Amino acid sequence: MHPGVPPFPKHFDGKRYFNPDAPQARGFLDVLRWKFTSRPQPSPRFVPDVTPSKPPASVDGSELRVTLINHSTVLLQQSGCNILTDPVWSERATPVNGLGPRRKRSPGVLLDDLPRIDIVLLSHNHYDHLDLVTLRRLAARGQSQFIVPAGVARLLRSKNIGPVNELDWGDALQLAGVTFHCVPALHASARSLFDRNRTLWCGYIIETPDRIVYFAADTAFGAHFAAIRKRFGTPRLALLPIGAYEPRWFMSSVHMGPDEAVKAHEILGATTSIAIHHGTFQLADESLDAPKQLLSECAPDNFLILNNGESMVLT
């Protein structure tokens, strides 16, 4: 981290979290307006094009192995440490059985084929990122520590999921020889109609002696990308979201489109970026594979699109 960099801006008013110096997520009336006026692009009911892969037990030495599992679930393996981001294996991203977004592609790695998971990173409490069914199964292995943004630990502990470490923007924690920095995102949180923005949302910088990796999680486009680069330097790898961006009047305060993800990639100066948050759940009005198609038209060669289950090795 560069010395003399100012702290991240205030983002809590004593009761609720907010996006500093940026638009806030749309409210409930806007949700109703969107739902009653939207014309979602058609997508297949299910796309049977995933052949699950089986990652190695660990990766030693200085290499980084990256496996896109699905949506924002990525397995990062380096220096004998296995890190999993926002793990979701459930059929639906919803609080109600039988309702809500259903997966349209299978996970690229079977849950039973996961290696030991040392660290689970959770970025916020939305159902497509914090999946209690999956987290219970991971916790039952007794191998993982969980890192969550402020306010989220209470939910996990209430379900006997742990041990849990809670971070605010600017906080850092060292586990398994890796330093995890909690960094800003522009988004929102809620698991019901009554807890809106009561817990924080975030991204993470994952720092080792060999490199830094940036997991942006869910975020709108904003000045935080430049702030993160100024504070930590250019990432070797950035995991940047590209999906759930239409209609822009509703989604632009919480999700980037592919063109904005390319701008973020350039601002960060990332050596390599990989697209996340696309191709598994249709959460907005664009079709399932529209984000991937649009990104392929505007992205530079070092902004990559992996299929579910596909891996790559970085040095």
Image (cartoon, helix red, strand yellow):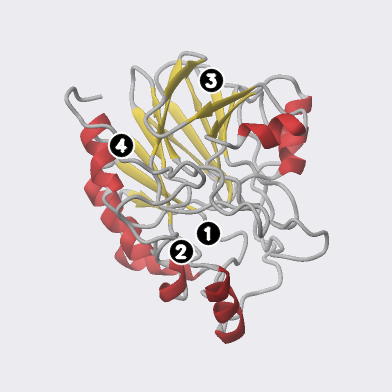
Horizontal side of 35 relative to 208 (left or right) equals: right
Q: Can I make out residue 289 in this image?
A: yes
Measured as percent of width and height from the top left, residue 6 is found at 22, 32
Label located before the other in sequence (4 or 1): 4
Which residue is labeled 4 in the image? 8
How many angstroms separate mark 3 from mark 2 (CA)?
30 Å
Which residue is labeled 3 in the image? 81
Q: Amino acid at mark 3?
A: Cys
Measured as percent of width and height from the top left, residue 51 is found at 67, 50
Which residue is labeled 2 in the image? 292
Residue drawn at 30 percent across, 65 percent down: 298
Which-is-in-front pick, marks 3 and 4? 4
How many angstroms separate mark 2 from mark 1 (CA)?
7 Å
Q: Residues within 10 Å of mark 2 (few under 14, many from 20)?
A: many
How many angstroms separate mark 2 from mark 4 (CA)?
32 Å
Point out the image quarter for the N terminus.
top left
Q: Quadrant of residue 8?
A: top left
Residue drawn at 54 percent across, 53 percent down: 307
Q: Amino acid at mark 4?
A: Phe
Label located before the other in sequence (2 or 1): 1
How many angstroms separate mark 3 from mark 4 (CA)?
28 Å
Q: What SS does tag 1 mark?
A: loop
Which residue is labeled 1 in the image? 278
